Image (cartoon, grey):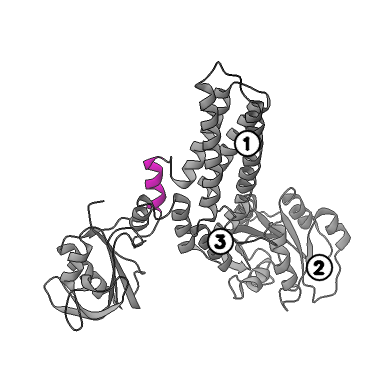
Amino acid sequence: MSKTIAAVATGPAAGPIGIIRVSGPQTLAIVDTIFTPQGGGALSERPNRLLTYGALHSRDGKVIDHCLCCVMHAPNSYTGEDMAEIQCHGSPAVLSETLSALFAKGAVQAEPGEFTRRAFLAGKMDLSGAEAVHDLVTAVTTQAAENAAAQLDGVVGTHIFEIRQQLVDLVAEFLAVVDYPDEEIDSHLFDSACEILHRATSELYDMAETYERGRILREGIPCAILGRPNAGKSSLLNALAGVDRAIVTNIPGTTRDVIEETIRIGAVVLRLYDTAGLRDTQDPVEKMGIDRAMKQAQASSLILAVFDSSDHISDDDLMVIARTHGKRTIAVLNKSDLPSELDVQNIQRHFDYVVSVSAKTGEGLQELYDLIPKVVGMDGMSFDGSTITNARQAAALVRAAERCEEAFVAAQLGMTPDAIVMDAEGAIAALGEITGQTVRDDIVSTIFSKFCVGK
């Protein structure tokens, strides 16, 4: 990491404040040439992390802003290197000219995620913490941010380190036995190994099983709204979104294409898809819309099956019931503001979750809001960092758990130490992929390439 890097850390649009970060061995020397503290002297001589007011200069020495800047001396910085942060006005022109000045003095453009990658390589955080930085930047709910912040504090990494160290110690004990094959193996060693491996297997599987909820927390859940024409699907979408997102008429077949809207319900982000009404039709365009509705329903993790409670059940309703079979579904009995004609008990025979609403008046919507987190398994969920939101980490946890389980069986059967060691070492390697101790360089590069420039 001999190069000094620089990048804009704030968004591309104009704003009141813009931040430029600089990191690397020439940081202090470079920043001293483009920033003059008020009252004179060099910025590099100011106390660590102290915001200093002064003049910001372009590459030809002209003053382009009066702003704040601070330096962070190695190793007490985010990257572990000498760093500087320029907090200027958020004009794109000022930011661009400041970068040009930094580049003219020897800095180079930072790659996506390069500041955090340097922090990882300097040992300022493990790889799970670095991935938590990305989750924190992209969090769309308060709960997702809380979970990511806890992981950045080391909730996942610390637990993984503890399990990994126990396995390393176990392997060391068995390798010592291998070095003295003529001596009888103490049965206590196998008993201790069984205890450690059984506990590790259980804990690792438990951690991996949180990923499904973690994926929902990070990515949201695709949710298709299905129903016959005029059941009130578009009205429900509009009511849930709080805006008139979809066209609502009494003409059957108004919705021809899939309409998408994203809403937040507590910790759950719902990606709602309003779809064409399901019915037998000869209209080729409407048929295409129905085909798209079926594909969207198949791809969705949750379905809101909408029924018109003011009318009797129809063949088209039966089609909706058939299409939602085996899917995680909430039956929404719409138009509760009108006299009921629907056989509710018949609907309840087909669905575990049934809620009555009026998309027109808003009656029952709160009950639907409360029900959705329960149906998708997010009710009562803690956001203390213990929920795994990363598919790579979840896969590594499963591999580690499987190898621990195999080592446990070998220890129970009293197999030769090398058999136990081989599986335990496999688990150690898998856990090292999570923290970054044994991960390949190409995987590390892929992880940080997903970061934004400046982070």
- Of badges 2 and 1, nearer the viewer stands 1
Residue type marked 2: Ser
Cα separation between marks 3 and 2? 40 Å
Mark 3 near mark 2, Cβ–Cβ under 8 Å? no
Cα separation between marks 3 and 1? 28 Å
| Residue 197: mark in rendering | 1
List the single residue furthest toward the top: 182
Cα separation between marks 2 and 1? 56 Å
Q: Position of residue 300 (x, y in %)?
A: 63, 53
Say which residue label 2 marks: 309
- Of badges 3 and 2, nearer the viewer stands 3
Q: Main secondary structure of the magenta part?
A: helix
| Residue 17: mark in rendering | none
- Which sits earlier in the primary sequence, circle 2 or circle 1? 1
Q: How many C-alpha atoms fall within 10 Å of the one at disc 1: few (<14), some, or many (≥20)?
A: many
Q: Position of residue 110 (x, y in %)?
A: 28, 58
Reply yes or no: does residue 316 show up in magenta: no
List the single residue furthest toward the bottom: 39
Magenta region: 440-450
- Label 3 secondary element: helix
Q: Nearer the viewer, residue 343 or 394?
A: 394
Say which residue label 3 marks: 147
- For image coordinates 75% across by 49% down, the residue present is 325
